[in-house]
Amino acid sequence: MGKIAMQSETKFRLGVLVVMALLAGCAKGTRDLEEKLAEIRSRQGAPVEPLPAMRDFPPFPYAAFDLRDPFAPFSEDENAPSGGGAGPKPDPDRPKEYLESYPLDSLDMVGTLGTVDNLTALLKDPDGVVHRLQPGNYIGQNDGQITAIFEDRIELVELVSNGNGGWIERPASIALDDE
């Protein structure tokens, strides 16, 4: 027999001995565990509290069967609120400004320049470039037009779809970043 074969046979025998020793250790010492379990099982359990009595509630009559389903789209004969007719609309011919390509939450106000009566806002875009803005400039992806600039915030009005082909104005603001 070769030297390698003898080494692997020796390792095999040693492994078998280790496994047998481990198994022999598992078989002993379970009597105290079984006695403890028998003692726990023989204990008297605590009484369980009875369930509370069920209360009867008076039935609620639902009387809105004849009303329009709020989740159904408007039909032709119904008057859709704030449809595509009157109200504010985005100007499709207006050239887009640079900061209209970013969502509002990605823009940070970093300061102001000027006097209280004539403030210019300093706004940092996600690329780290700082822009000067005045009331009337557009920012954000919802046609947001700046209405006022204060030392601690920029206020604007966005145009968002109302889901029925019309548009509604939604106020928004960007606060001064306190970093």
Image (cartoon, rainbow, N blue to C red):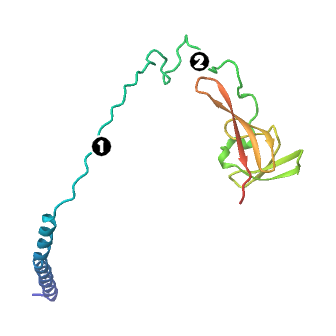
Disc 1 secondary structure class: loop
For residue 52, which numbered disc appears in the image? 1
- What amino acid does circle 2 point to? Ala
Q: Is 9 situated left or right of 133 in this image? A: left
Q: Earlier in the sequence, mark 2 or mark 1?
A: 1
Comparing 80 with 57, the one in front is 57
Residue 158: give x, y in percent of width and height. Answer: 70, 35
Residue 10's image quarter?
Answer: bottom left
On screen, residue 11 above or below 137: below
* Badge 1 density bin: few <14, some 14–19, many ≥20, Cα 10 Å: few
Residue 102: give x, y in percent of width and height. Answer: 67, 44
Disc 2 secondary structure class: loop
Residue under label 2: 80
Residue 155's image quarter?
Answer: top right
> Which quadrant holds the N terminus?
bottom left
For residue 116, which numbered disc appears in the image? none
Residue 53: give x, y in percent of width and height. Answer: 29, 40
